[in-house]
Image (cartoon, rainbow, N blue to C red):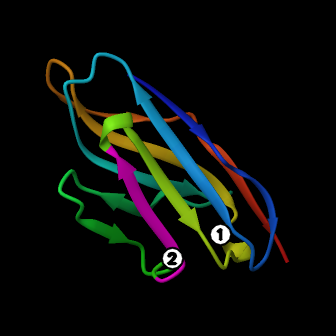
Amino acid sequence: VQLVESGGGLVQAGGSLRLSCAASGSIFSINTMGWYRQAPGKQRELVARIGDGGYTDYADSVKGRFTISRDNAKNTVYLQMDSLKPEDTAIYYCNIRAYLTDWRTYWGQGTQVTVSS
């Protein structure tokens, strides 16, 4: 499975970015898709995730500002990030739970998001 992330970059506080993560490979099914982030000196943390039925879960710090969505036909997950704050600065990692020959978790390579004040 390959996860290709895009959409990171540098933005001013209050701005927006949209991350995308496309999964490819001999995927039979994808269950949960999500985004995690890791800031310098901190542990990786969940940002948002979405189940195959559309159930969503957000970190308290991003509720009301970030929106996760998925396109099952394209095996792609998106993260719309609005009202960005400097504390959102981190490397953002895509994460999926997929079935090829068994259920496994896969990670993207990460994309840098930097929010300037």
From the viewer's perspective, tell me whether residue 54 is left or right of residue 58: left
Q: Earlier in the sequence, mark 2 or mark 1?
A: 2
Q: Is disc 1 placed on a helix, strand or loop?
A: helix
Q: Quadrant of the C terminus?
A: bottom right
Does residue 65 show up magenta in the picture? yes
Which of 57/80 is in front? 80
Q: Name the residue type under label 1.
A: Asp
Does residue 23 show up magenta in the picture? no
Query: Which numbered tag is attached to residue 88?
Result: 1
How many numbered marks, from 0 up?
A: 2
Query: Which numbered tag is attached to residue 62?
Result: 2
Q: Quadrant of the N terminus?
A: top left
The segment highlighted magenta reads 64-71
Q: Is disc 2 placed on a helix, strand or loop?
A: loop
Q: Residues within 10 Å of mark 1 (few under 14, many from 20)?
A: many
Q: Name the residue type under label 2.
A: Val
Residue drawn 61% across the image and 57% down it: 18
Residue drawn 57% across the image and 34% down it: 109
The x and y percentages for residue 92 are 58, 51
Examine the residues drawn in magenta and state their main secondary structure: strand
